[in-house]
Amino acid sequence: MRSIERHEHQLTEYAREQLSQISGVTLIGNPKRRVSVVSFVIDGISVPETGQLLDKEGIAVRAGHHCAQPALRALGYEMSVRPTFAIYNTKDDVDKLVVAVRKIVASRGR
């Protein structure tokens, strides 16, 4: 179990690092103890549209409230895009997500 936890943590931290370098992408939250989830928004693109665009790129994410409206509102948001990483994911999966997000941002002239 510890190796699974370590793997998921490494992917999550790698995703946070890579996504944080994209202009126009805002990561939501920065808890000291994380689960294998990254929440973000892209400036000027609605969360549902971001989810649909990532889906077209073959990237599965959750896009919406996540049954966490009070928590999101406390952070100043109504919705977020949320990829989740598990044992079957790889660094390559994170790289594909980052490429797809960069493509979405670039397509909007950012």
Image: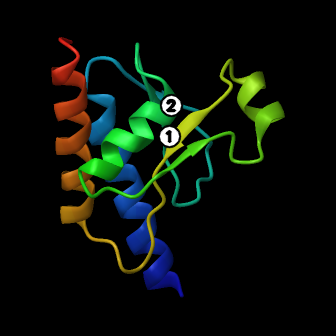
Is residue 19 positioned above or below 41 on the image?
below
- Secondary structure type for disc 1: strand
**Where is 15 relative to 43, above or below?**
below
Residue at 54% from the left image edge and 88% from the top image edge: 1
Q: Residue furthest right?
A: 70
* Snapshot quadrant of residue 3: bottom left
Measured as percent of width and height from the top left, residue 85 is found at 44, 64
| Residue 33 position within the rendered picture, expressed as x and y whole percent measured from the top left | 62, 52
Tell me whether circle 1 and circle 2 mark residues in contact (CB < 8 Å).
yes
- In the rendering, at what x and y percent does residue 26 appear? 44, 24
Query: On the image, numbered disc 1 is attached to which residue?
Result: 81
Crowd class of label 2 (few under 14; some 14 to 19; many from 20; radius 10 Å): many
The figure's colour scheme reads rainbow
Residue at 21% in and 12% down: 110
Residue at the image point whose x is 17% and y is 33% from the top: 103
Q: Is the residue 102 above or below the residue 95 in the image?
A: above
Type of amino acid at the residue the image marks with label 1: Val
Query: Disc 2 marks which residue?
Result: 47
Which amino acid lies under the numbered mark 2 shown in the image of this protein? Answer: Val
